[in-house]
Amino acid sequence: MSQEQIELAAEWIAKSKRLVVFTGAGISTESGLPDFRGPDGVWTRRDKGLPPPKSKPWHSVDPNAAHYAIVELQNLGLLDFLISQNVDNLHLKSGIRPKLLAELHGNTTLMRCLQCDRQMTHEEAGWDQKIFGPGYRTSPSQPHQPQCPYCGGRIISSIVNFGDPLPENELNTALDHSKTCDVFLAVGSSLVVTPAAYMPQMALQAKAKVILLNEGETPFDKAVHIRIHGKAGVILPQIVERVKQLLQSD
Ligand code: NAD
């Protein structure tokens, strides 16, 4: 990581008209949630025959400096859209407006109606997980389980498990933004989980400037315009601080 990379990334972001940020599990490791493919990730440890990494209880985890740096970009009016593979609710908890966010793999705190596609909290749905379980798409229906309070349809967990389709609206919105952005900033993702991983590719094809901030290697390392190796919670606030200075000096 060099100061020049931070400076250039900040210049591009400050001048951007349609900034898209894309995040993966790596942005939440500094909050205490393990990722899958980082050095201490769930899959990495499993492949070495080690037990799963320690994790804080998901409901007690708070956003870290990297999540809040993205909120600052939103509050500066620079964030056109945020695409996340994370299910940890930390972007919404940090203050990202739901309209600016597509959570491609769902959110552990939200249920979804299969009929009207509306998302709602467990409380809103009247869904007690102790009684009705997680409510995954493939879970058998429980007697007397709540229906959608808005349309009466079947509600399921918004979490996308292996084999489940991605939520269509979120996926299409995310694809549209990836094809039309002018700066694409990917943070904390190994960029191997498809179809999300096609999004940086689309941004490159659309001639957007692509910035990649990740500790580990990705298949896009040589293709992107700026590749920053480092911790999201350390680097992203530095970039945003510099963005603010550049906007003030304009
Ligand atoms: P991944 O585990 O494949 O990759 C994470 C990447 O982030 C790794 O390359 C790692 O080196 C890097 N990283 C770790 N900590 C970092 C930090 N502090 N700063 C910068 N980089 C850091 O994650 P992925 O690409 O998001 O794909 C994994 C899948 O697992 C996704 O589908 C996601 O839904 C799911 N997942 C989500 C969570 C979560 O919601 N927090 C946690 C684990 C897994």
Image (cartoon, grey):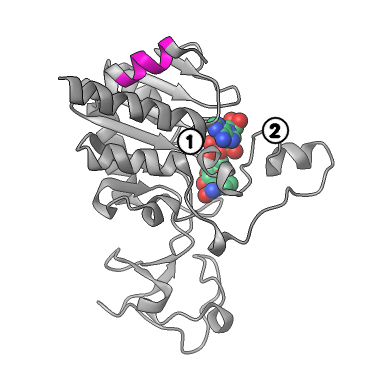
Q: Position of residue 214 (x, y in %)?
A: 53, 27
Which disc is residue 194 wearing? 1
Residue at the image point whose x is 41% and y is 32% from the top: 237
Residue found 54% across the figure and 51% down from its top: 163
Give the class, few, some or many, for how many residues have Cα within 10 Å of label 2's Cα (few <14, many ≥20).
few
The residue at 32%/76% (across/down) is 153
Q: Is residue 22 left or right of residue 174?
A: right
From this viewpoint, is residue 198 visible?
no
Q: Name the dominant secondary structure of the magenta segment.
A: helix
Residue 51 lies, with reference to residue 238, above or below; the image says below
> Alpha-carbon distance for marks 1 and 2?
21 Å
Image-quadrant location for residue 215 = top right
Q: Quadrant location of residue 244?
A: top left
Q: Is residue 7 inside the magenta stretch?
A: yes
Query: Between tags 1 and 2, which lies in front?
Result: 2
Q: In the drawing, does residue 188 fall left or right of residue 224?
A: right
In magenta segment, residue 150: no
- The part of the chain drawn in magenta is 4-10
Q: Which residue is mark 2?
A: 39
- Please state which of residues 137 and 193 is positioned toward the viewer in this rendering: 193
User: Quadrant of residue 130 in the image?
Assistant: bottom right
